[in-house]
Image (spheres, rainbow, N blue to C red):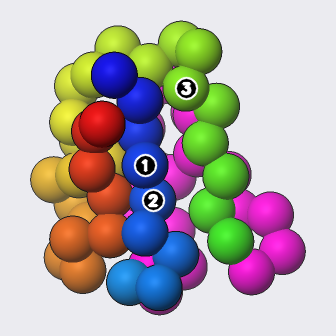
Amino acid sequence: MKIVINHEKCTLCGKCIEACPMNLIKKVGNKMKVQNSRCIKCRMCITVCKNNAIRLN
């Protein structure tokens, strides 16, 4: 599984960055970028995203 961000729904609020215990999500320019290689699938990024812009695929 990997983290997928829907960039059309993402408002760049940064809550997913703060919530991720592995620091896998970063804001780069006007998009969120994900490094999935160390994801522990805790789903914290999904929980804090109020716009439903994040999912595990």
Query: Residue at image x 21%, y 71%?
Result: 52
Q: What span is in magenta?
A: 10-30
21 to the left or right of 28? left
Q: Amino acid at mark 2?
A: Ile
Residue 17: in magenta span: yes
Q: Nearer the viewer, residue 8 or 19?
A: 8
Out of 4 and 15, give the one closest to the viewer.
4
Quadrant of the image occupied by residue 36:
top right
Q: Which residue is mark 2?
A: 5
Residue lying at 57% horizontally and 33% vertically, measured from the top left:
23
What x and y, as percent, mark residue 19? 37, 46
Side (left or right) of 28 relative to 3: right
Res 56 seen here: yes
Q: Residue at x 44, y 19 (%)?
A: 39
Q: Which residue is mark 3?
A: 36
Asked if residue 39 is among those painted magenta in the image, a careful observer would answer no
Q: Are marks 2 and 3 in contact (CB under 8 Å)?
A: no
The N terminus: image quadrant? top left
Amino acid of disc 1 = Val
In this figure, which residue is indicated by the disc labeled 1?
4
**How far is the residue under mark 3 from the one under mark 1?**
9 Å
- Whether pointer 1 and pointer 2 mark residues with C-beta atoms closer than 8 Å, the reply is yes
Q: Secondary structure at mark 1?
A: strand
